[in-house]
Image: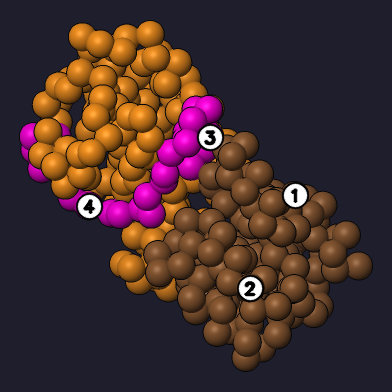
Chain colours: A orange, B brown
């Protein structure tokens, strides 16, 4: 299990605590307003064994990638709340769709914090390789608990804006 | 009263439908499209009274849908329901003729506040 030091980073240190605070506020707002559920920030180990993330990228003068991690039971809870129906009535595609929309809302609101022209991608749900979980400077993690399950939001900042999501996913 | 909900997320279309009912718009017939291009076709075929559109979608974005409708002489009111909330985006929406912009996450009260002046 990976232990993640949230504030380690050779550069960009000033923005990192601020980013974590912003992400926490946005995620809690999304949870309460759209899902009617409580989300509590927790300080715990990053533990998402299936490594499935809903991802959006924000491309401006810099590139930000927002990855949202939630394990299967929590993804199902999200979809149940959004579709207002039971897990048995939902397809895997609908659960992915709801999960992606969570990343879209968090990423879109995060983008709104920056006073600069930038583009938000549509969300993708992807399984990340193990290399993702190595330390990368300029990466911030916020972890929460919802109904006993862990949710993590990871924001990674890159200096250059010409990289593709595929390229940086390998980092 | 017919409202076209345009969003590439089925989950979000469901939430908007539910929010319309919770906001008190009980006599609404909600129809759906999953992107701007599909919405253009639905507008032609079904002439909705209002379009509620996401901003960021594959195929055709919401702002391009709005511009295309106006270019065709279609003046159906269009409001955006979007997770994007930058001042630039808001200005672009209003300058292009959007009736309102609702930012996700939103409450039924926000839907009511935005739609009432148009639908009453």
Marks 4/2 same chain? no
How packed mark 4 is, by other alpha carbons closer than 10 Å (few <14, some 14-19, many 20 or more), is: some
Marks 2/1 same chain? yes
Closer-to-camera residue (A38/A168): A168
Residue A88 lies within the magenta run: no
Task: Kindly identify which residue carries mark 2.
Answer: B71
Task: Kindly identify which residue carries mark 3.
Answer: A112
Residue at 54% x, 44% y: name it.
B84
Name of the residue lying farthest toward the bottom: B45
Residue B5: quadrant of the picture: bottom right
Residue at 53% x, 56% y: name it.
B55
Task: Kindly identify which residue carries mark 4.
Answer: A126
Query: Label 2, label 1: how many angstroms apart (C-alpha)?
Result: 29 Å
- SS at badge 4: strand
Query: Label 1, label 3: how many angstroms apart (C-alpha)?
Result: 19 Å
Mark 2 or 1 closer to N-term?
2
- Which region is colored magenta? A107-132
Task: Kindly identify which residue carries mark 1.
Answer: B110
Residue A91 in view in this figure? yes
- SS at badge 2: helix
Mark 3 or 4 closer to N-term?
3
Name of the residue lying farthest toward the right: B120
The reply to whether discs 1 and 4 touch (Cβ–Cβ < 8 Å) is: no
- SS at badge 3: loop
């Amino acid at each position: 299990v990976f232990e993640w030091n949230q504030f380690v980073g050779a550069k960009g240190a000033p923005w990192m605590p601020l980013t974590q605070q912003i992400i926490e506020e946005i995620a809690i707002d999304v949870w309460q307003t759209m899902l009617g559920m409580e989300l509590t920030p927790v300080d715990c180990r990053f533990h998402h064994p299936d490594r499935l993330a809903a991802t959006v990228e924000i491309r401006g003068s810099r590139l930000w990638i927002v990855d949202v991690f939630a394990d299967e039971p929590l993804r199902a809870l999200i979809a149940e709340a959004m579709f207002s129906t039971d897990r048995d009535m939902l397809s895997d595609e609908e659960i992915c769709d709801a999960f992606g929309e969570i990343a879209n809302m968090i990423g879109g609101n995060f983008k709104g914090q920056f006073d600069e022209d930038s583009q938000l991608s549509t969300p993708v749900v992807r399984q990340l390789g193990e290399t993702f979980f190595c330390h990368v400077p300029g990466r911030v993690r916020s972890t929460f608990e919802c109904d006993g399950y862990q949710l993590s939001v990871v924001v990674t900042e890159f200096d250059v804006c010409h990289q593709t999501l595929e390229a940086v996913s390998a980092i | 009263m017919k409202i076209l909900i345009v969003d590439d997320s089925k989950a979000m279309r469901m939430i908007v439908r539910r929010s319309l009912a919770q906001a008190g718009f009980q006599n609404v017939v909600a129809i759906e499209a999953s992107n701007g291009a599909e919405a253009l076709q639905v507008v032609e075929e079904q002439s909705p009274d209002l379009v509620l559109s996401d901003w960021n979608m594959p195929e055709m974005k919401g702002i391009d849908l709005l511009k295309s409708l106006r270019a065709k002489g279609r003046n159906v009111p269009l409001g955006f329901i979007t997770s994007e909330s930058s001042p630039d985006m808001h200005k672009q929406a209003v300058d292009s003729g959007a009736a309102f912009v609702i930012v996700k996450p939103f409450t039924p009260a926000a839907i009511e506040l935005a739609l009432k002046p148009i639908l009453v």
